[in-house]
Image (cartoon, rainbow, N blue to C red):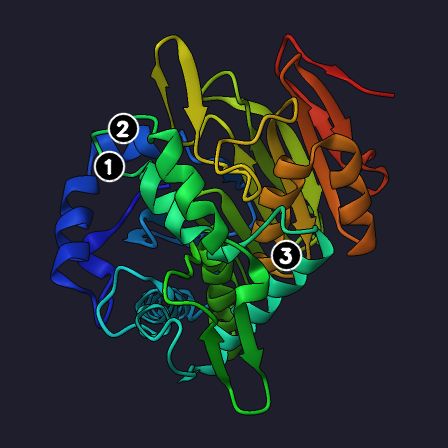
Amino acid sequence: MKARPTKMKLRNMSEQTAKRLALALGAVLLVLILVIALFPLLDSVGKPYEVTTYAMGSYVQQSVYGDNSEEAAVAAADAIQSLENEISWRVSGSDVQKLNNAAGKDWIELSSDTMEILEIAQDVAERSGGAFDVTIAPISRLWDFDSERQEVPDIDTIDALLPNVGYEFLRLDTEENTASLKNLDNAVDLGGVGKGAACDAAIEAYAETGAEAAIVSVGGSVGVWGQKDSGADWSIAVRDPNSDGALGALSIESGFLATSGSYEKCFTQDGKTYHHLLDPETGYPAETGLVSVTVLCDNGARADALATACFVLGLEEGQALLESYDAEGIFISTDNVITVTDGLQDRFTLTADGYTIAE
């Protein structure tokens, strides 16, 4: 996809975002687009309005169809930026920052969007036995995979912070739209669901503005809205963990896809590679024999949370968790074996070499 900055007219864009967009133009952007975890393979269904912006720490790509496609893309970009301002712990005055600052002290009133995301996150946390946990913040900040200076934290520091991690420390009052963290040293990080939630916000904007169809991708999350003129399914490429190319294609009618992969953020120290998918029980990167999990379900934030939970749980427990949500998935192991859940068996086509599909 190619950004068209002279036509974007995106409102409420921060100065930092604008600078990042300027850097994204041209050849650099085209290279970066190739390495997102999932990306749409758009065949000819009429000419879409295509635009790339930046939010949630990732490039946001939109292909929107219909007479009001540009208006819908603007509305979606605004919705994603607004959501980031609510749920990012890095944004001053955000809901999550207020919640973290009030840890161990007060209950905080939150927006309905933030509450809904927290409810989804807590549900996955409980049903996965804590394999996904937004209270991982003290540990994830310690590892700080987004920084340039990456190193394995001191084991004593990890051990000291681990008691502060536990989804039971996050308490929600859905009737009052309030939340609290039990202890002073608790903190929440919604990075594990943020990109999927951004796709939810975009799809809602498309529906409200009357877009005919659209695909939005935010990092490793994708949302698909509406139908092609031909009535055919959409074809979505799944990232090859061993290259910047595609592993294969997944045919879907609509819904949300999210991928968690050990290749996304990682560094090597003393000959060992460490990735960003942390096990809340140990405080270290999860080691379950998987390199990637892709999840398809009816909600972007939930798909995001499930992809991480399944990665941490491993193949067998991950499959059971997806089944409990009536969701589908693609698991890729460290020995290049691909396991596809029953509902996707006839929808996934392997195109990359070096892999086998489990029977």
Residue 284 horizontal/vertical position (percent): 48, 32
Q: Is residue 161 visible?
A: yes
- Label 2 belongs to which residue? 150
- Label 1 belongs to which residue? 147
Horizontally, residue 103 falls left or right of residue 19, namely right
Mark 2 in CB contact with mark 3 (< 8 angstroms): no
Amino acid marked by disc 3? Ala
Residue 79 found in image quarter: bottom left
Instruction: Write the residue at 39% across / 82% down.
Output: 106
Q: Please tell me whether mark 1 sits on a helix, a strand or a loop.
A: loop
Q: Is residue 215 visible?
A: no
Marks 3 and 1, how far apart at CA? 27 Å
Residue 320 or residue 47, whichever sits in front: 320
Mark 1 in CB contact with mark 2 (< 8 angstroms): yes
Amino acid marked by disc 1? Ser
- Label 3 belongs to which residue? 125
The quadrant of the image that shows the C terminus is top right
Amino acid marked by disc 2? Gln
Instruction: Write the residue at 65% across / 19% down.
Output: 351
